[in-house]
Image (tube, coloured by chain):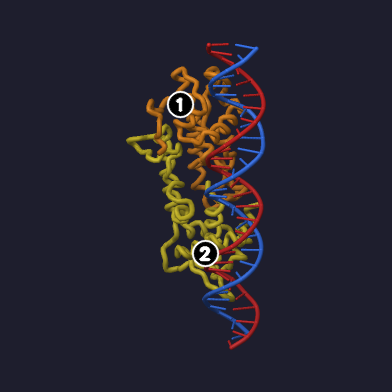
Chain colours: A yellow, B orange, C blue, D red
DNA sequence: ATAGTAAAAGACCTTTTTGTCTTTTATAAA
DNA sequence: TTTATAAAAGACAAAAAGGTCTTTTACTAT
């Protein structure tokens, strides 16, 4: 469904939120280890998240990553759009650049409702709602 | 939704079927041109389709590609599985290797019905049913 | 037969994605 | 104020996806 970068981003953010809920601020090392992502690749991804203001970071001893609790929840779709772009979520499955009700590709009519369901799911589901569904035993479920 | 190879494969096969319906056997040059794919890349893809027995080919003057009319219709899912593999269509969106009702990822319950709808669509829709929905004016809709 | 045509095959190249390594900068605790 | 720590930055490398070019093989129409 998603590429690696998006997958790591989602898992990493959920891990951060999950730890934040326990009043902890995890660092990259810990995050990468627990969500099974390459450490430095994960670092780059989280830098991007910080630049986008999805999360905050703290340098130095005791530092790490955390969500601003005063901000609204972060829907998955924002992460997907940032990393994979609009085509991933609104593009034509057949590859037409303009594909709509007036100019439908051979898949259009059947595909549209599915695409809408996907959009709905990823707009409603947030990092916070997903963190709440996660297990305490977060470790190594990706093997 | 799909990678380039799958997209070209689907479009190419539909083009072939569409021309076959007019009693024509298109060659690679014509196919690539009309579906807006790179010629030699398209050639490789169609070779794969021939090896899988999805289509037949004919070398020499007047040659090209065609479907065996005595065979059943070709569902999209077979092409997708061949090129992108099972994960594309049955993988966990969150990246778990085992994700099921007993061991659900935070997206599982909401994602499963969508995945099933996608599977249903691509199992029911065939190259032949899509060719039947295509326009005579096949050319250059991909710009 | 043979000449022309079109697919098959395979070597090669480019771009994107994924991943690694090293250096720099900021911060907090001692 | 120094030291340890952790994020930021950026150069580099490997692998995968996407694409090109050339040669070989097979076939068909003449």
Q: Nearer the viewer, residue D3 or B19?
A: B19
Circle 1 residues within 10 Å: few <14, some 14–19, many ≥20: some
Left or right: residue A97 versus residue B4 is left
Q: Residue at x 59, y 35 (%)?
A: B82
Q: Are marks 2 and 1 on the same chain?
A: no
Label 2 element class: helix
In the image, residue B68 lies at what x, y percent? 55, 19
- Front tag of 2 and 1: 2
Number of numbered discs: 2
In the image, residue B96 lies at what x, y percent? 60, 50
Q: Nearer the viewer, residue A37 or A18?
A: A37
Circle 2 residues within 10 Å: few <14, some 14–19, many ≥20: some
Residue corresponding to mark 2:
A47
In the image, residue A5 lies at what x, y percent? 54, 54
Q: Residue at x 50, y 34 (%)?
A: B122
Q: Nearer the viewer, residue B76 or A17?
A: B76
Q: Residue at x 53, y 68 (%)?
A: A65
* Gap between marks 2 and 1 measured at Cα: 47 Å
Residue B86 visible? The answer is yes
Q: Residue at x 40, y 29 (%)?
A: B138
Residue A125 visible? The answer is no
In the image, residue A140 lies at what x, y percent? 64, 56
The subunit carrying tag 1 is B
| In the rendered image, the vertical position of residue A55 relative to residue B21, given as above or below | below
The subunit carrying tag 2 is A
Left or right: residue C24 versus residue B18 is right
Residue lying at the far left of the rendered structure = A102
Label 1 element class: helix
Residue corresponding to mark 1:
B129
Where, quadrant-wise, is the C terminus of chain B in this rendering?
top left
| In the rendered image, the vertical position of residue A105 relative to residue A19, given as above or below | above
């Amino acid at each position: 469904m998603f590429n690696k970068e998006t997958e790591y981003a989602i898992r990493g953010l959920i891990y951060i939120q999950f730890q934040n809920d326990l009043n902890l601020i995890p660092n990259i090392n810990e995050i990468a280890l627990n969500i099974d992502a390459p450490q430095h690749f994960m670092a780059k991804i989280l830098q991007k998240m910080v630049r986008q203001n999805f999360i905050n970071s703290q340098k130095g001893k005791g530092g790490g990553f955390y969500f601003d609790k005063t901000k609204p929840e972060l829907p998955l779709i924002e992460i997907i759009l940032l990393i994979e772009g609009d085509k991933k979520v609104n593009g034509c499955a057949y590859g037409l650049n303009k594909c709509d009700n007036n100019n439908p590709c051979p898949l259009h009519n059947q595909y549209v409702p599915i695409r809408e369901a996907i959009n709905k799911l990823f707009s409603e589901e947030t990092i916070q709602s997903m963190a709440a569904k996660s297990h305490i035993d977060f470790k190594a479920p990706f093997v």
